[in-house]
Amino acid sequence: AQAMGVELVAKPAAWRAVQQWFATHAPDHTVPEINRRQALVPIGARLLSNSAGTAPGLLARLGTAWIACLPGVPHELRLMVEQLSPLLPRLVPGLCRPVIGELYLAGIGESRAQELCGERLTASNPTVGITVSEAGHIVIRAVGTAAEVRPRMIELRKLLADFALPEAGLAASLVAQVSSTGQTVTAAESCTAGHVIAALAAAPGASAILLEAFITYHAAAKTARLGVPAALIKKHGVVSEAVARAMAEGARRTAGADFALATTGIAGPGGGTAATPVGTVWLACANAHETVTRRVLLNGERTRVQARAAAHALLLLWQVVRGQPPAGKATAAGGRASVATAQRVALPHGAGNTANAVPPPRPSRSTPQ
């Protein structure tokens, strides 16, 4: 209002919207008087309705410029931007909305992706860049005109086909892939405490593949719920390849699922030793033919170790489902030999941080025991 040089006036329609929101979402609460300020609008400004909250957006003209004021709550902001975007071409004649192409990748580090892309990562015409997500994937995004973006994306998809995900992220890709074959998934989690199954369940359509899941935090629960022999735990320790394998096979057997994931590790901040430091996590994925194991060493605080371990577990499942296991040593039925590769993975502190640009560790494979 100060920038426009006008007064704020109360808009009855805006106040009714606030009252309606409370009536729908908090019927037992009286609308606080302080919320009346959300119905104040600069003279000449247009209200933008907010279906997700009480604060409306505003759209106003100031000289030759348009000013849009939107709520700062992320999910409200996204909805408001979707409402505002169709208005922009009319408000700003000649404005050309850019075309955006995205390619989601998994199983490749950021540095390797950059090497493969080479000169295809450009600063303009189109702008092509890479960002890293803690959910376990990389996104290559191209922004420009349709004539610029489409051929570049075709080129990038061919170049990175071995790592491309069909959907936006590992969880959504797993739901799409596994449901397409009518198969099912379960998980037995210890250190991740539900992060794995929560990530899968967050993807639309997850009910088609998820049966049930187990959070077996204590050693006794692993034995009681999954049938992990107490002697095996005593011999190898809870955080071990043998226990991770037994957890996955026990979960698959108990739930009757086609695939079962298992996680066991030390999320910290305490509990680590010189031999098994904080951040050590053993993963396993079992199906009808074999069990694949992997060890990862993760940096960061407790919640980040849990989240990153869950991401690595989903990546392992994706590779098993797609039949894309990195090289490992197969073990004959009843055999004990196995090879697992450990790798320390630094957690990214922001999008595009190269600290997470690390290829996944190689797995170890064995047949069910």
Image (cartoon, rainbow, N blue to C red):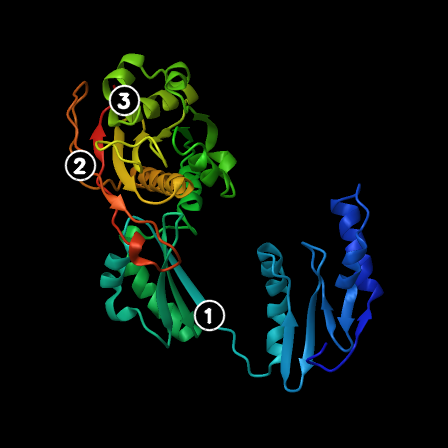
First along the sequence among labels 3 and 1: 1
Residue 200 in picture, x, y percent from top left: 45, 39
Q: Give the labeled residue for mark 1.
A: 99
What residue is shown at x 50% (from left), y 42% (from top)?
A: 202
Q: Which amino acid type is marked by label 3? A: Gly
First along the sequence among labels 3 and 2: 3
Instruction: Locate residue 104: give its quadrant.
Output: bottom left
Instruction: Locate residue 180: give its quadrant.
Output: top left
Pick the residue in front: 270 or 76: 270
Q: Give the labeled residue for mark 2.
A: 328
Residue count near mark 2 (Cα–Cα under 10 Å), binned few <14, some 14–19, many ≥20: some
Q: Give the labeled residue for mark 3.
A: 237
**SS under mark 1:** strand
Please tell me whether residue 8 is drawn above or below residue 331 in the rendered image.
below
Residue 187 in picture, x, y percent from top left: 40, 29
Q: Nearer the viewer, mark 3 or mark 1?
A: 3
Pick the residue in front: 64 or 176: 64
Horizontally, is 300 left or right of 76 in the view? Answer: left
Residue 280 in picture, x, y percent from top left: 29, 35
Q: Which amino acid type is marked by label 1? A: Val
